Image (cartoon, helix red, strand yellow):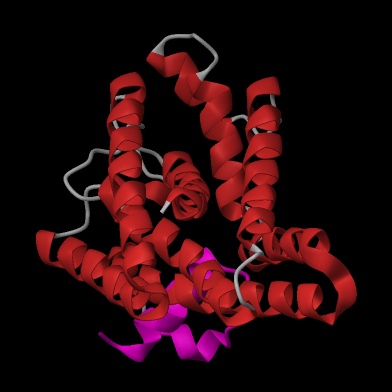
Amino acid sequence: MKPAMFWATLQFITRIPVPASWASGVDFRQYGRGVPIFPLVGLIVGAIAAAISVAISQSGGGIYIGAMGYVLVLALLTGGFHLDGLADTCDGIFSARNRERMLEIMRDSRLGTHGGLALVFCIGIKTLAVVELSHLLPLQLFAVLVCAPVAGRTAMVLLMYRQRYSREGEGMGNIYIGQVSRRETGSTLLLGGIFIGVISGWQGLFAMGITLMAVYGLSRYFCYHLGGQTGDTLGASEELGEVIFLLALLWS
């Protein structure tokens, strides 16, 4: 894979500054080829957020401020991109309307009650999960916090492979949904598994297995209600994947 594809993918799904020349030559419609890089992007994002979180908690800030710092940095590094998808998905899915109306609601830029509740619970549970994991030694805590974004971005591929785009016409999610081959899907899952296995061992792999099963279940749920996937459901799966991974670690 060309280095330009890595930089284009990093630039597209994060807010990490990337010089435009580094990503030149990659057409927007080719971004689907960058899916196998998602675990690596998660590794970079997770390492930055985990380092800041552990530094805060170990320098006197305490475990609560450290946990809040972790969640805040994750949101800043992605520009709230995935959180927005989670909120839009919940506004649509829980509106109890027909499929067409759900998709219209998901396109509405205004935040609804269900979307607001989803954000509160997602951020709150993620923060409290990090607090509960803070009994680990600093290096162990750093390792598991790095792995959560890796698991979330790896699991996203399950909403892309052999899935259909639920909207008519073009959309941001359309460059990924249904555009990923079996080989690219396998490569994404393998790379994510390698990263998590090396960094956090069998406990991490167990948590990743739980995450993949849960996200696959979500993909079927979204498909049943929406007739397919959208860019919003991709974002929702990433956020929920991180939460599920952290919760699974508490029981592993």
Residue 2 lies in the magenta stretch: yes
The image shows residue 225, relative to residue 55, as above or below, that is above
Residue drawn where x is 65% and y is 68% of the image:
77
Q: Give the total of numbered labels.
A: 0
Q: Quadrant of residue 183?
A: bottom left
Residue drawn where x is 51% and y is 54% of the image:
246
Residue drawn where x is 78% and y is 72% of the image:
57
Query: In this rendering, does residue 105 appear at all?
Result: no
Residue drawn where x is 21% and y is 58% of the image:
180
In the rendered structure, the answer to whether residue 51 lies left or right of residue 106 reads right
Query: In this rendering, does residue 65 appear at all?
Result: yes
Q: Considering depth in this image, is 70 or 77 the residue closer to the camera?
A: 70
Q: Which residues are magenta?
A: 1-25
Q: Considering depth in this image, is 88 or 220 the residue closer to the camera?
A: 220
Q: Considering depth in this image, is 159 or 138 the residue closer to the camera?
A: 138
Q: Position of residue 156 (x, y in %)?
A: 36, 53
Q: Position of residue 195 (x, y in %)?
A: 35, 77
Question: Which quarter of the image is occupied by the C terminus?
Answer: bottom left
Residue 135 lies in the magenta stretch: no
Q: Position of residue 141 (x, y in %)?
A: 58, 72
Q: Position of residue 163 (x, y in %)?
A: 22, 41
Q: Quadrant of residue 196?
A: bottom left
In the rendered structure, the answer to whether residue 115 lies left or right of residue 172 reads right
Q: Main secondary structure of the magenta part?
A: helix
Outermost residue, left direction?
Answer: 182
The image shows residue 210, relative to residue 199, as above or below, that is above
